[in-house]
Amino acid sequence: MKILTLCLAAALSISSTVSFSAPFLKPTKNLDNSTTSNSVIASYNRTNKLAYKSIGDKGFDAANTVIKCKDGNFVLLGRTDSYGAGDMNISAIKVDASGNILWNKNYGAEESEEGYAGLETADGGFIFAGYSDSYGAGSDIKDGWIVRTDAKGVRIWDKTFGSNQSIDEIYSIVPTDEGNYMILMNSIPIETGKSDIILLEIDDKGETIWKKSFGGKSSEQGKSLAKTEDGYLIAGHVEGEMMTKWDMLLIHVDKKGTKKWEKTYGGGDNEMANVVKVMPSGNILIAGYSYTYAEGSHDAWVVCTDKNGKKIWDKNFGGLSTDETFDILVTTNSEIILIGYTDIYKADEYGNNVSVLSNEIMINKLDAKGNEIWTRTLGGEKDQVAKAGAMTDDGGFVLVGYTNENMDTKNVDMLILKVSADGK
């Protein structure tokens, strides 16, 4: 028997827990060799309560991103080692606006696969991107991997990108104006161990149109891609010449991948970027974390620049704990939502932080000038981290990530959470 747990959370803490049992449902084998997992764990809203749904079994299941669909539904994309054919597979789960599962698919083979980015295609299907150890080079050498599906998540085709001489992972994908797709990939040659940023344009069959590489003597890593009026922005981080620290990195390229300019942001310690977004004004937001400007271990850090990469303002969020931003949402009135996590520490009798009690979701709302409107932390006794979000039609947003019973257990489930416009 599988134990399903229903958890209802108040704005800042878990208020009640109810457990019940349900039969374990064996994953269904699909005709395209993907699998459908049939076991789902759910919770639901009550008045003035914040509810989250967790999806998974006894393994490690986590969402890395969420796709808002044209039909008002959402697709969670990440990883599962509870279901599927190998050690770990890409997991894609479509839910309706209330969080009810519409379909659940896994993609992979005997080794490991994970999904980091995805989008809905013009025909209502999907492209999921990440890496595969099973296909391409195989044998524990990661290749960038793309899976193209129909509207129900059934695989149409898949492609690997990379070689048996490098470790390759796709972190971001955006559509082009011509109906193709721009892919951001990191490639680490096994011989040198120095990461380069790879930008590729592919067509709807997965065929490469062109490929550009960005890198030098030091490592450069790309984590997020955004479209501009005249090209694309690549956000990530670059290793210093003495290999002692990292700076946030922002590269602007034209539509053919030719570099127009490159900027770095940071201080005397490490700063790393996870996401880039373009504001309606044309200003650019880059967010991740900073050691240099942190009060604790590292703080969530967001930098706003003009369209040429010149810094306008920056803000850090956090206390004596570890804090990080993974995603940015921009509202219709140009307010900024930062999505990430914060550590909650247990203090000793002298008030010193001695151990991490749990992770909690942290959401920061700012105006377009970087002024803080509010900060919310959501969580309780469970470890909860938000990796991405999407706006909802009512002005609120959904958050996805992962949760577990406590930080000592290996049982981690996908998390989806609906939040109102005021973060509650």
Image: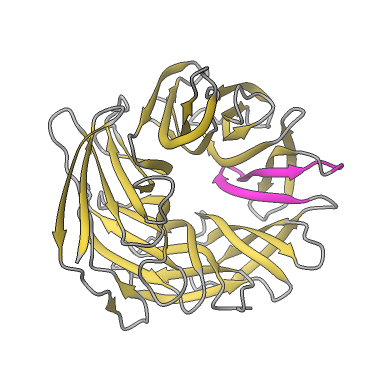
Q: Residue 47 placed where, x, y %?
A: 12, 30
In this rendering, the answer to whether 213 lies above or below 43 is below
Q: Mark yes or no: residue 332 visible.
A: no
Which residue is at the far bottom? 31
Quadrant containing the N terminus is bottom left
Q: Residue at x 55, y 45 (%)?
A: 226
Which of the 4 image quadrants contains residue 12?
top left
Q: Mark yes or no: residue 109 visible.
A: yes
In this rendering, the answer to whether 240 lies above or below 219 is above
- What scheme was used to colour the molecule? secondary structure
Which of the 4 image quadrants contains residue 132?
bottom right
Q: Residue at x 77, y 60 (%)?
A: 193
Q: Residue 287 placed where, x, y %?
A: 57, 34
Q: Is residue 148 left or right of residue 48?
A: right
Q: Nearer the viewer, residue 8 or 228?
A: 8
Could you tell me how many numbered marks the image carries?
Answer: 0
Quadrant containing the C terminus is top left
Give yes or no for residue 225 being in the magenta stretch: yes
Q: Nearer the viewer, residue 281 or 109?
A: 109
Q: Residue 109 placed where, x, y %?
A: 46, 78
Q: Residue 353 placed where, x, y %?
A: 53, 26
Magenta span: predominant SS is strand
Q: Is residue 279 left or right of residue 240?
A: left
Q: What segment carries the magenta color? A: 219-242
Q: Nearer the viewer, residue 406 or 365?
A: 406
Give yes or no for residue 186 being in the magenta stretch: no
Q: Residue at x 57, y 47 (%)?
A: 224
In this rendering, the answer to whether 139 lies above or below 376 is below
Q: Is residue 1 left or right of residue 277?
A: left
Q: Nearer the viewer, residue 85 or 148?
A: 85
